[in-house]
Image (cartoon, helix red, strand yellow):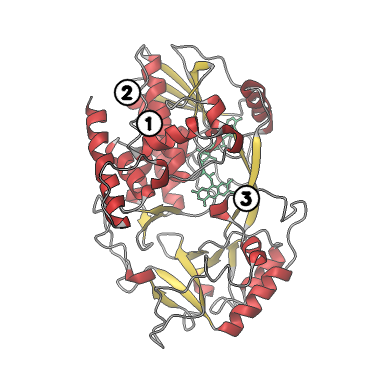
Amino acid sequence: MGNVRIIGGGLAGCEAAWQAASLGADVTIHEMRPVRPTAVHQTDRLAELVCSNSFRGDKLDNAVGLLKEEMRRLGSLVMRVADEVRVPAGAALAVDRHQFADRVTAAIEAHPRIRVERGELTSIPPSSPDSPVIVATGPLTSDALSADIAAFVGRDHLAFFDAISPIVLAESIDMSKVFRASRWNRSLRGQTPSDKTPDVLSDGDYLNCPFTKDEYIAFHQAIVTAEKTEGHDIDNTKFFEGCLPIEVMAHRGVDTLRFGPMKPAGLDVPATGRWAYAVVQLRQDTLAGDHYSLVGFQTQMKWGEQARVLRMIPGLERAEFVRFGMIHRNTYINGPTVLTDTWQARSRPDLFFAGQVSGVEGYVESAASGLIAGRNAALVSLGRDPRPAPRTTAIGALAYYVSHADPAHYNPTNITFGIMPPLDAPPRSKSDRQLATSARALDTLASWAGA
Ligand SMILES: Cc1cc2nc3c(=O)[nH]c(=O)nc-3n(C[C@H](O)[C@H](O)[C@H](O)COP(=O)(O)OP(=O)(O)OC[C@H]3O[C@@H](n4cnc5c(N)ncnc54)[C@H](O)[C@@H]3O)c2cc1C
């Protein structure tokens, strides 16, 4: 009888547990909350989303859309629940974070083969082929366990910092100044691979706050001169490039924000029919539509400064902040030196790593690594051989990257088409190439999953 122990009941741990139990293993999840909280989680729920409520793009012309579709086809719990509780977000998949965590927790707790034990594990427990262990403790792995993992991997953890976006109360937004639109009019309707399309607002899923040139220049200046939280030297902190704080971008040049998260392209201002000089986008954060997050506005400005500076955004003059942006720790191992493409430790095949701590980046990627690690841990516990997913799938490419990238310059990654092998006969246009790469991936996945 297979027995799998999982440390951490986050996105990776829950998906791993679901997959392992579905293959017939008995599973124990050790989750330290609420006995021991983290600096960022706010509830005792499993699979709590700590920052954005977005699972990013949901179409097959983008790699994370492909990864999600592969997960759906492999029976992912995380994707099933995400689809059930999605909220309008253009061509992206965003979820109601409370319902998401509640439903994942309920599904895990109701599964007859899964047991959840609350409490911190301070060291990696013993593992054996009958009883493999998966470490899925995330970017905020507790200090004691981090020290034990560092001892096991034989070198210091790499640590870097990410920063998160503020959320405002919908009723505090001045609706006379903002306009509703999705970039290039891309709405959610009819564009998801699985065609799970709830009713959406036909005139766009985002609220957009348009800036004139003068407003933008003043706003940029305010960001550059705002006080930041102490203890993090803005120039020496190592940020994930896809999640840069706005002040880091603002310091790079006056136009950097305008070509980044404040890009106005594709957003016609209804009053003029033209694009604004710059735009801040607000994305609905709850199903009820009472919270909106500022898209791409991670920041480490002091909270008082955030209130002052962000109220310069047209439409947010009287904004009430449900949560301010902040800076956080990220703990991960050097995947290429430690892991194989089955998410097993090279030196200890009955020990697996999954999720952010294994060296991937993002909600979907973390759950995806948990999906394969959970399956493989169950196979090992049942006396069978673990199976890497094919490299031509997004889920397999992610594992290949984590286990084969250059260890000397290792950076956790989101899934991209760039880490998948090129096509033998690639179409000329980029979007056709991406769709063909996705079609190849889904074909390969079907044969692999059916074998
Ligand atoms: C502040 C912050 C903001 C982020 N913002 C985003 C974002 O906007 N979008 C995005 O895609 N990703 C974001 N990330 C990355 C995000 O954490 C991961 O994408 C995702 O949550 C990782 O899933 P996971 O299962 O690996 O970790 P988690 O979801 O964090 O789950 C790990 C679990 O392990 C538990 N745990 C830790 N140590 C122990 C222990 N010793 N014993 C028992 N249990 C333990 C924790 O309590 C936690 O529940 C953010 C991370 C942080 C910290």
- Three-letter residue code for mark 1: Trp
Circle 1: is it few (<14), some (14-19), or many (20+) Cα within 10 Å? many
The residue lying toward the viewer, choosing from 372 and 133, is 372
Helix, strand, or loop for circle 3?
A: loop
Disc on res. 239: 3
Residue 376 location (% of width, % of height): 39, 23
377 is higher (above) or lower (below) than 263: above
Q: Nearer the viewer, residue 351 or 437?
A: 437
Give the spatial CA distance, label 1 vs label 3. Answer: 32 Å
Secondary structure under badge 1? helix
Q: Work out whether 403 lies above or below 254.
A: above
Badge nearest the viewer, 1 or 3: 3
Name the spot of residue 406 as percent of width and height, x first. Answer: 54, 34
- Give the number of callouts: 3
Q: Which residue is tagged 1? A: 18
Mark 2 surroundings within 10 Å by alpha-carbon count, few (fewer than 14), some (14 through 19), many (20 or more): some
What residue would you read off at disc 2? Answer: 23
Quadrant of the image for the N terminus? top left
Give SS at disc 2.
loop
Q: Point out residue 186 in the picture as x, y percentages from the top left corner.
A: 32, 67
Q: Give the CA separation, mark 2 to mark 3.
A: 38 Å
- Please state which amino acid type lies under the numbered disc 2: Leu
Q: Can residue 306 be seen at all in this image of the molecule?
A: yes
The residue furthest right is 230
The crowd level at tag 3 (other Cα within 10 Å; few <14, some 14-19, many 20+) is some
Could you tell whether 318 is left or right of 28 in the image? right
Give me the residue at 38% from left, 68% from top: 205
Q: CA distance from mark 2 to mark 1?
A: 9 Å
> Does mark 1's beta carbon lie closer than 8 Å to ligand 1?
no
Q: Is residue 105 visible?
A: no
